[in-house]
Image (cartoon, rainbow, N blue to C red):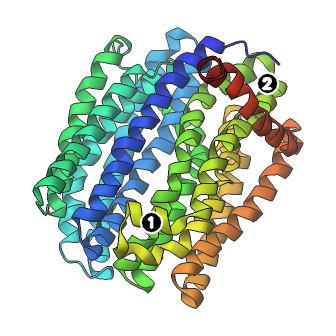
Amino acid sequence: MKDPNRHYWLRSGSNTMILNTQALLFGFGGFYLLVHILDKHHFGIWALFIATVTIFEMVRSGLVQNALIQFLSSNREEEHAEILSASFVLSSLITVICIGINIAIAGFLAKLWHYPLLANMFYLYSIVYIMQSILTQFQWIEQARLSFKGILYSTTLKQAGFFGYLLYCFFTHFSPSLNSLIYVTGFFTLAGAVLQYFFVRQYLSFHFTYRFGRIKKMFHYGKYVLASSISGIVTNTLNQMMLGTLMSPDTAGVYNVAVKISNLADLPTNALGTIVFPQSSKRFAGQGKEASKYLYEKSVGTLLALLIPFVLILFLFPSFVIHVIAGGRYADAIPLIRITALTCLFSPFSRLFGTILDSIGKTQYNFLVVILFLSFEVVLNYFMIRRQGLMGAIYATFIANVIFFGVMQVILRRELRVNVLNTFVYAFRFYPEFWKMYLKPVFGK
């Protein structure tokens, strides 16, 4: 099947590839610097803190982002003002609720992880939530218009600013407080929001139209999408929380190092997922299930082809990778790397499973599967951490992913007649196609 939207893929793909390349340079680079700037205990506390606040960020994204994109893509232009109004109201309400919960649990988590200053960190981050809600709202509006240029610039500014501060600390041997990291995050989040505004201001010229029915409709759509959008981050977060509680924050930091390194493989998955959802929504509306089937199989195959070389490096040389990135202090993360690398191979299937089902209106199926998966994985993690410690968390996540993979393929086969073998065919074809289209003209002469 020929791709009828090649220009969309080239334009959006190039922007998101650049976006994820800079995420590698600034996001992972920032992680590298933090591992060397902070001692093991403070890095563990920071990892637990970021994992916790990220859940609240993902709750707002899950409830609003895909609903806004779906409704703007599938409704007439004259309805867009009402849709935008509803999204602003819903996002604001969720932000206020998240801030309230954040403040309420701050003291409890500070005692649980034996770090009294953690409560003040949660209080301070409430300001960042507000700035982040403005930035993401603007970015979702642009994404719904099938544009990613402003997202690229604003995200780069935010991440590059934080990375620059860490680079300064690294070379000057300055030891920053954890509070100062929050101040820097907030400043560059606000700067990114201001920059993003100039890319979407033409779409913000609308009369505010309040209609409770529209808000309710977006919420009910988003509540199903929420489960799939936060599944990965919640799993890793709860694992870290259980390790920090049942063992120590230092152990949670070691787990975070292993997961961060393995999550490099998720960069192309996240990039393609960002592109696939709005495109799949349009294709399904115009071409039906066959187009969504092809989109899923082709996208997963491409991601597998990109992942496999990276997974092989992690699996064969875990000790080398850990020592180069994190140093000798985190040698206890070496046994974790091989299993987390293999777990990454399930990422394209699970991420695009949710994306495709959401885009064809089967959000309920996605919601139920993810909730069952998360519940099973959390229970399994709890018992295996108690029995096997750090390795128990890794094994539990891998086992849960194997079971989840089987369930996903049964559902996709029934709904879209997806053949999982086709994904491996597309993965195998990717290498000669990539050589013929891009490398041979340069090196094959």
Q: Which mark is residue 322?
A: 1
Mark 1 neighbour class, 10 Å CA radius: few under 14, some 14 to 19, many 20 or more:
many
Amino acid, disc 1 = Ile
232 displayed left or right of 361: left
**Residue 413, horizontal then vertical, whole percent:** 87, 44
Q: Earlier in the sequence, mark 2 or mark 1?
A: 2
Residue at x 28% of width, y 59% of height: 34
Give the amino acid type for the residue marked by disc 2 in the picture.
Ala
Q: Nearer the viewer, mark 2 or mark 1?
A: 1
Front in this rendered view, residue 70 or 289? 289
Q: Is residue 284 left or right of residue 108?
A: right
Q: Point out the image quarter for the N terminus.
A: top right
Residue underneath mark 2:
291
- 165 relative to 155, above or below: below
Q: Residue at x 79, y 18 (%)?
A: 287
Q: Quadrant of residue 316?
A: bottom right
Distance from label 2 to label 1 (Cα)? 42 Å
What is the secondary structure assignment of the residue under circle 1?
A: helix
| Occupied quadrant, residue 106 | bottom left
Q: Is residue 142 above or below residue 332?
A: above
